[in-house]
Amino acid sequence: MNRTILISGASIAGPSLAYWLTRYGFKVTVVEKASHLRGGGYPIDIRGTARDVVERMGLMARLRRLHVDTRRITFLDTDGSVLTSLRPEAVTGGAEGLDLEVRRGDLADCLYGLVGDKAEFLFGDSIAALDDRGGHVEVTFDSGARRAFDLVIGADGLHSNTRGLAFGPEERYHRYLGFCFAVFTLPNELGLEHEAVLWNTPGRAAALYAQESGDRVYGFLTFAQDEPPFAAFRIPRAQRDLVAATFPDTVWEIPRMVAAMREAGDLFFDIVSQIHMPAWSTGRVALVGDAAYATSFMSGQGSSVSLVGAYVLAGELATHRSDHAAAFAAYEKTIRGFVERNQALATEGGSALAPRTRRHLDARNAMLRGDTALRTRAEGRSAVTSLDLPDYEHALGS
Ligand SMILES: Cc1cc2nc3c(=O)[nH]c(=O)nc-3n(C[C@H](O)[C@H](O)[C@H](O)COP(=O)(O)OP(=O)(O)OC[C@H]3O[C@@H](n4cnc5c(N)ncnc54)[C@H](O)[C@@H]3O)c2cc1C
């Protein structure tokens, strides 16, 4: 009988999984590299099936209060003139009035609030080594502590430590989508409120995003790049130089954004990539969320997929308590198709948010002008991202 479970990572997938596992009577430990729960952060959407999951967690009322409520997206032409303004649902495929948009940190905080006193949390530590002995897993932590667990689950994100230890290097599973992005905050000089403004030229996008009426906004600079700029990852200055050199434009707010990016204390620079793995478990170790199947921010579905993945993994472990191999197989069988459909949205989403060529940009703009075509496409998108959620009520209290 599997009883003790170690989860690596306390963001979205980790605490969700911990919540469901403790409800099903497992003894859960969560190890998080950061010294405390990481707050703040960019807004994420909770859509479709993931809404059912947070409803089942009893979080809906609280998340509604935290809803960021983006009211419009304004698209700009390459010369900075306005193409059109739309409700965000017309682009994202969400349902007006039904989607939830919250800060990633607020969602993590809500999830932690559900389980912080029911699971053991080890902040400021990380798994240094894993030894799957067949009947249990021996874990050595960075702190030097050594403990045994029945199962270990990696929920430690795109650059997962658990994946590296149990499945091998990230290069094997990593799929670069051909874009880089920089996110940072800057003064809200345009007085934006609950809205985003997006400027495009082929292969490049610049956006300002105001979650509410405040004196700061998020700036996003996204650009196509054939090869990932690995050298720039090691040198923060080189990241800023690369982004600045890619945006020499003198239109709209670009010069001010580039200047702010150069000075930003909160700059986050990364490549847009996904994780594709032939299997999400090996022996007594499995992965969930971005660690297993990152969909990339261009899909807009990463947190939703993580919430659904954690719910299903916990439900299957509770259903197959003495047979983790059967549980892991059922977890994959239930959501692999759903995950793949969501991953497929990223290239589509990428082409809507940052069309790569003049032809793609012109086609996107034509769709924006004829709002209906875009809406139909968005509705199709919403349909492929939903899943008939299994019910694991039978496992409660067992
Ligand atoms: C700019 C941006 C915008 C996005 N927008 C959206 C959106 O609109 N909608 C959406 O659904 N998704 C969006 N996403 C994606 C979303 O944030 C992720 O898909 C989601 O957070 C995945 O959750 P996770 O828990 O699997 O991983 P993460 O949120 O990456 O969390 C991993 C956790 O593991 C911890 N960790 C890392 N290494 C270790 C270690 N060695 N030991 C212990 N702990 C470790 C980290 O500190 C972190 O707490 C966006 C992402 C970005 C970057």
Image (cartoon, rainbow, N blue to C red):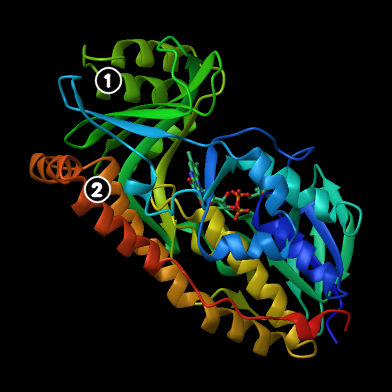
Res 384 → quadrant: bottom left
Which mark, residue 57? none
Label 1 crowd bin: few (<14), some (14–19), many (20+), radius 10 Å: few
- Please name the residue shown 74% across and 88% down the image: 320
- Please name the residue shown 88% across and 59% down the image: 119
The reply, left or right, for residue 352 in relation to residue 300 is: left
Position of residue 270 measured from the top left corner of the image (x, y, whole percent) = 44, 38
Report the front residue among 242 and 81.
Answer: 81
The residues tagged by marks 1 and 2 sit, at their Cα atoms, a distance apart of 22 Å
Mark 1 lies on residue: 245
> Mark 2: which amino acid?
Ser
Position of residue 231 measured from the top left corner of the image (x, y, whole percent) = 39, 34
Position of residue 365 measured from the top left corner of the image (x, y, whole percent) = 15, 40
Q: Is residue 384 above or below residue 187?
A: below
Q: Determine if residue 288 is in view.
A: no
Report the front residue among 72 and 187.
Answer: 72
Mark 1 / mark 2, whichever is N-terminal: 1
> Mark 1: which amino acid?
Ala
User: What is the residue that sits farthest to the left in this orientation?
Assistant: 359
Q: Is residue 351 above or below residue 342?
A: above
Q: Secondary structure at mark 2?
A: helix
Position of residue 251 measured from the top left corner of the image (x, y, whole percent) = 21, 14
- Please name the residue shown 24% across and 48% down the image: 351
- Please name the residue shown 32% across and 47% down the image: 91
Locate the N terminus by quadrant: bottom right
Label 2 crowd bin: few (<14), some (14–19), many (20+), radius 10 Å: some
Q: Secondary structure at mark 1?
A: helix
Q: Determine if residue 203 is in view.
A: yes
Res 160 → quadrant: bottom right
**Which of pointers 1 and 2 indicates the residue nearer the eye?**
2
Which mark, residue 351? 2
Locate the C terminus by quadrant: bottom right
